[in-house]
Image: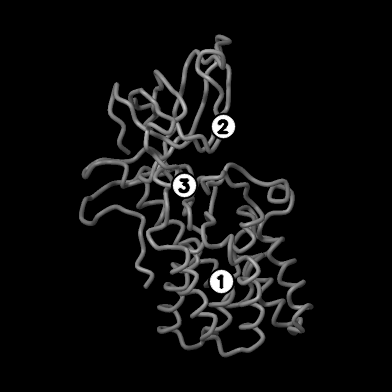
Amino acid sequence: MNANSGHDNFWLIKTAEKKVNVKGAAYLDMTVCNKEGEMNAKLWDYSELVHGEYIAGDLVKIRGSITVYNGNSQLRVDKIRRVNENDGVNVSDFVPTAEYSGEMMLGLVMNIIASVKDDELKRITYALVKDREQDILHWPAAFKLHHAIRGGLLYHTLSIIKLATAVCSIYPSVDKDLLFCGAIVHDLCKIDEFDLSPAGLVTGYSVKGELVGHLVMGAVKIAEKAKELGVSEEKAMLLQHMVISHHGEPEFGAAVRPMFLEAEILSQLDKLDATIYEITSAVSEVNEGEFTARQWALDNRKLYNHGRKESKPKAILE
C-alpha cells in the first residue's frame, strides 16, 4: 500500500465514523482504499467545522503518514479535503477491482450453464442469474474479507467453478451438473445482503442482510423460481441444501451441515478459495522474509512471506 509520509495522496473512503477517545477528544475513524487495497486511517482532534464531514464513497485528498499500530499499517491524517475537478481523478481509479471485466466473467458463467445437461437445473440456474444480471457484473463478494472488491462475486464464483472442474476430472462419481449449478447460485443473494456505495464497494449490511442473510434468502429465491418455472421440488431442494449448508458449520452461519457429496465439495471449495485469497492478500502487504500481523479471519495466525511466488490474490479464469 503506497502512501508517502508527509505527502498528498488520493483515497476513497470505504467507512467513516466519528468516535471519542478515553480523554473525550473526538476523532474520525476511517477505512480508506485504492486499487492496491485498504487500510485504517485516523484523523485526531476531529472537528466537522474545521475538517468537514465525510461519508463512505467520498473521494478525498489526504496529507499524512503511515504508522504501525498492533502490527497493522495505519494512516495518520494531518489534512483532508474532498477532491475537486482540478484534481483530475476519477472514483473508478480508486476502487479495488477484479482483474477481469464483469461482462467477460458473466459470459464464462453463462457458458458453464449452457453446458449443463440436466434441463431443470439448467433452466433454474439460468433464470436466477438472469434476474440479477446487471448487479452481478460488479457486485463484491464480501464487506471486509475475501473478494471484497468490485466484481468480486463473479470472481469468487468462477474460481470455485475452476476448482470444481478439477475435482470432477479426478472423481467421476461427482454430479458435475449439480456441483456447477450449486456453485453458481450459492452466493447470488449477497446482492441483497449488502449496501453499496456509488463507487461499488460494500458499506455495510442491509436490514434484510442482517436479519435474514444470503443463505436463507438464496433458499427462498430458489423455491420461488422453481415454482415459477415448474422445476421439480426435488431438484430445487438439492440446490437449496447446497446454499444453506455451504458455510459448513452452524457456528459459521450454515443452517445445516452438508449432507451429500456435492454439497460437501462446494463447502470445502468455498472455504479453500476464500482462504487462498485471504492469505495471498495478507502476505502481499509485507516484504519477503517478513511475517504479517495476526489474521483474525485465519485463526489469528501470523503468515510468512517466503518470496518464492508473487503474493497477489489472483486466479486464472479463462
Residue bearing mark 2: 55
Q: First in sequence: mark 3 or mark 1? A: 1
Tag 1 or tag 2, which sits nearer the N-term?
Answer: 2
* Cα separation between marks 3 and 2: 32 Å
Residue under the point 48% across and 57% down? 152
Q: Earlier in the sequence, mark 3 or mark 2?
A: 2
Quarter of the image that includes the C terminus: bottom left
Question: Crowding at label 1, few (<14), some or many (≥20) Cα neighbours within 10 Å?
Answer: many
- Residue drawn 43% across the image and 56% down it: 275
Badge count: 3
Q: Mark 3 against mark 1, which lies toward the viewer?
A: 1
Q: At numbered mark 2, what does the secondary structure look like: helix, strand or loop?
A: loop
Whether label 3 touches label 2, CB < 8 Å: no
Disc 1 on helix, strand or loop? helix
204 left or right of 77? right
Q: Answer with the quarter of the image where residue 245 lies.
A: bottom right
Residue ID for mark 3: 299
Disc 2 residue type? Answer: Ile
Indicate the amino acid at tag 3. Answer: Asp
Q: Nearer the viewer, residue 40 or 108?
A: 108
Q: What residue type is labelled 1?
A: Ile
Dot 2 and dot 1 residues touching (CB under 8 Å)? no
Q: Quadrant of the N terminus?
A: top left
x, y percent for residue 64: 35, 23
Give how far across and how far down residue 57 sits, in percent.
53, 38
Q: Residue at x 45, y 37 (%)?
A: 12
Residue indicated by mark 1: 184
Question: Taking 249 as reference, is 110 left or right?
Answer: left
Kind of element beneath mark 3: loop
User: Gap between marks 2 and 1, in whole Å?
Assistant: 33 Å
Badge nearest the viewer, 3 or 2: 2
